[in-house]
Image (spheres, rainbow, N blue to C red):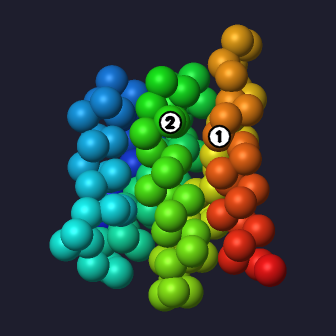
Amino acid sequence: MQLRELVRVINNSLEAHIAQLLPGLTGSLDGKGATAPIKIEALGFLRALLQTHPAAVFHPYLPKITPPVYKNVAEKYAKISAEALLVCSEFAKVFPGKEGFDYAPLVAPLYTAAYLLFR
């Protein structure tokens, strides 16, 4: 919760630090020692980043951050799955944000993750 509040308080100020933040986030989402509360906090933080920063900032990093989020959509723990779906809804807003960015390879795995959850 504190990380999300940090993003909201310093709105749009972490743009220069995204590259340093994302490896820790992805490690928190798919690392062996990642517990449920850590995953929930990491997903919430990522969602807050996506909501408060320009889409173009994330485009170079989307191929690395989408797979662990998609993996958490299928998580058995409902809170993790729900938070991952909220992040996916933010991805859908970020994908088409920049001219020339090819987001097509990121859409099929998103569809698959959601489909497998809801079937």
Q: Could you tell me if the residues under marks 1 and 2 are in contact, i.e. CB atoms within 8 Å? A: yes
Q: Is residue 97 visible?
A: yes
The quarter of the rendered structure image containing the C terminus is: bottom right
SS label for mark 2:
helix
Q: Residue at x 69, y 76 (%)?
A: 117
Residue holding disc 1: 106
Classify residue 35 by image quadrant: bottom left
- Give whichever of 31, 89 is nearer the camera: 31
Nearest the camera: 53 or 117? 117
Question: Residue 82 or 30: which is nearer the viewer?
Answer: 30
Q: Residue furthest right?
A: 119
| Residue 64 vertical position relative to residue 17 in the rendered view, above or below | below
The location of residue 34, given as percent across then percent down, is 26, 72
Q: Is residue 8 visible?
A: no
Residue 43: image location, x then y, percent = 45, 62
Farthest top residue in view: 100
Give the residue type that dot 2 points to.
Pro
Q: Is residue 100 left or right of residue 55?
A: right
From the image, which quarter does the N terminus lie in? Answer: bottom left
- At 34% from the left and 52% from the top, the residue drawn is 26
Where is residue 44? Give x, y as percent. 46, 63
Q: Disc 2 designates what residue?
A: 63
Which residue is rendered at x = 50% and y = 36% of the image? 63
